[in-house]
Amino acid sequence: MTHDEVQIILIAASWAAGACIVGLAAVWGLRRRRLVWLIGSVAVVAVGAVAAGVVGTARAMFLSHHDFEVTLWVLAVAGVVAAAGATVVGTALARWSQSLQAEARRFGESGTFVSGTGAPVELQQLSDELARTSARLAESRDREARLEGSRRELVSWVSHDLRSPLAGMRAMTEALEDGLAEDPQRYHRQIRSEVDRMVRMVDDLFELSRIHAGNLGLSLEPLMLGDLVSEAIASADPVARARGVRLGGAVDAGLQVVADPAELSRVVANLLMNAIRHTPADGVVEVIGRTGASGVELTITDGCGGLSEEDMERAFDVAWQGSAARTPEPGSVFGSGAGLGLAIVKGIVEAHSGSVSVNNEDPGCRFLVQLPSFA
């Protein structure tokens, strides 16, 4: 590279840099203006930097007056064309931005955002992210609405379940006080049964409040799933026999799970009692434990006859019972009767980083508990 070429490069660079600095300062002053002004200004700055470099070089090369004028005209025409093109692009970007702004405003009013198409990648990505946020907010609103509905149902149903036994106990105690009870021992047994049922209801409410508050402390340890299932079946067998329901099950030999013994026992017991409660006489309830693709799988099948789609969606909601009937079974051993058993199951399983689901499987339902494997 010759000395003259180096000199020309330096002159062009210095003139172009000076024009660029001045232009960028002007653009910074317009930063709060409309997008079309910013894009047009950037185009003018670019053309101005080129023009400054050409002018500085032309003066150093001592061009003739005619050639210098021709160069200036070329630069002026090129600058106008560049500014016009930048204006078109800026107008399009401004329209895309205004459209996105209008959709965002409607999003704030209605809570729903519909992503448009055809915008530049950055604006399209912003639009898609707002659409995903809209979907998540809609899911959150639905979840909150279901929880609020469940809370109201729980308050209403628990109030009913408490009022009925309390009224019965009051009548029985008054009969005992007045000496009108023909069989006082039967009244005492009935009162004790009602008290036990209310205690179970309060225990379930306390357990559910711990789950929802995130205060369910787990003492994890390795467990033989077969032993735990055997104990649960043995405890539930007298109840099943009284209802004419047969219990069965099988667990893979040596299958272990890391869990809280008391809480996992409660999960199995709640699911077993729920299955027995909804299985008709001569029906079968079966418990199967095995290693699945994602960990340990525990399934409980019953003979309830199946659930509707709506019931399957609500099966683990607080206070769901699958029917509108609110009359408890006298002396029932099936929990509180307030529809908390399956909600507690879901909370305990999720606290173990697992999942629980239900689907129909002839002749009834199949509850599936999945727990992670631990090395």
Image (cartoon, rainbow, N blue to C red):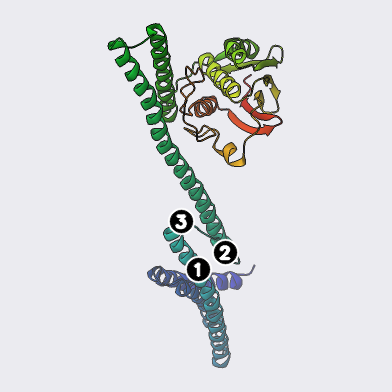
Going by the numbered disc 2, the residue's amino acid type is Gly
Q: CA distance from mark 3 to mark 1?
A: 17 Å
Across and down, in percent, residue 320 comes to 50, 33
Residue assigned mark 1: 99
* Foreground of the two, 305 or 100: 305
Q: Closer to the N terminus: mark 3 or mark 1?
A: 1
Q: Locate the C terminus and report the quarter of the image it occupies.
A: top right
Residue 161 vs residue 136: left or right? left
Q: Which mark is residue 116?
A: 2
Which residue appears at 63% of the width and 22% of the height? Answer: 373
Q: CA distance from mark 3 to mark 2?
A: 16 Å
Q: Which mark is residue 266?
A: none
Which residue appears at 52% of the width and 81% of the height? Answer: 55
Going by the numbered disc 1, the residue's amino acid type is Ser
Going by the numbered disc 3, the residue's amino acid type is Gly
Query: Disc 2 vs disc 1: Cβ atoms closer than 8 Å?
Result: yes
Residue 227 vs residue 161: left or right? right
Q: Closer to the N terminus: mark 2 or mark 1?
A: 1
Report helix, strand or loop for mark 2. loop
Q: Locate the N terminus and report the quarter of the image it occupies.
A: bottom right
Across and down, in percent, residue 278 comes to 59, 26
Report helix, strand or loop for mark 1. helix
In this rendering, the answer to whether 155 lies above or below 144 is: above
Q: Which mark is residue 111?
A: 3
